[in-house]
Amino acid sequence: MKRHLYLVGGWTSLALGAIGAVLPLLPTVPFVILAAFCFARSSPRLEAWLLHHPTFGPHIVAWREKGAISRKGKVAAMLAFAFSIALALIFAPWPWMMAPIIAAAVGGSWIWTRPEG
C-alpha cells in the first residue's frame, strides 16, 4: 500500500512539474526532485529514468549531493516570479496582488541561499 502511495505521489509530482513548465508561478524542478524521491521508494526503474534524464537528471543529482540549484535554475525562478508579479499587479485586486510578491520574497531568498551546482 505504501509503495502505491509513493508511486501516485511521484506521478502527481511529475504532472505538477510538467504543468509548472508552462505556468509562471508553479515551479518545475522541485516537483521533479520530489517525483524522484517518491519513485526511489516505489519504482527503481522510474527513479533511474529521472536520474538519467538529460534535462532533469543533473538537477536531481546536484540537489541530492549538495542541495544545489544551478545559476540558470535560479535565474529562471526569478524570471517566473517577476512574470507572476507583473500579472498580479495588472490583473489582481488588492490584497491578492501581494501574494506573488510575498511568494517571490520568501521563495526567492531561499533559492538564492542554496549552493550552485
Image (tube, rainbow, N blue to C red):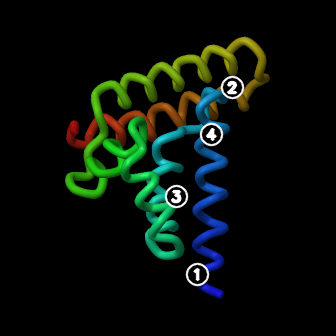
- How far apart are the two marked residues, 4 and 1, measured between alpha carbons? 23 Å
- How far apart are the two marked residues, 4 and 3, measured between alpha carbons? 11 Å
Give the percent coordinates (x, y) of residue 35: 52, 58
Asked if the residue under mark 1 is in contact with the one under mark 3, i.e. CB atoms within 8 Å, the reply is no
Q: Nearer the viewer, mark 1 or mark 2?
A: 1
- How far apart are the two marked residues, 2 and 4, measured between alpha carbons? 25 Å
Q: What amino acid type should be assigned to the residue bearing mark 3?
A: Ala
Quarter of the image holding residue 21? top right
User: Circle 2 sits in a helix, a strand or a loop, which is it?
Assistant: loop
State which tag comes first along the sequence, 4 or 3. 4
What residue sits right under mark 2 in the picture? 97
Query: Left of 17 or right of it: where is 117?
Result: left
Q: Nearer the viewer, mark 2 or mark 4?
A: 4
Give the percent coordinates (x, y) of residue 89: 67, 16
State which tag comes first along the sequence, 3 or 2. 3
What is the crowding at mark 2: few (fewer than 14 residues within 10 Å), some, or many (at least 20)?
A: some
User: Circle 4 sits in a helix, a strand or a loop, which is it?
Assistant: helix
Residue at 53 percent of width and 50 percent of height: 31
- How far apart are the two marked residues, 3 and 1, measured between alpha carbons? 13 Å
What residue sits right under mark 4 in the picture? 18
Q: What amino acid type should be assigned to the residue bearing mark 4?
A: Ala
Residue at 66 percent of width and 57 percent of height: 12
Asked if the residue under mark 4 is in contact with the one under mark 2, i.e. CB atoms within 8 Å, the reply is no
Residue at 29 percent of width and 51 percent of height: 61
State which tag comes first along the sequence, 4 or 1. 1
Quarter of the image holding residue 113? top left
What residue sits right under mark 3 in the picture? 35
- How far apart are the two marked residues, 1 and 2, measured between alpha carbons? 40 Å
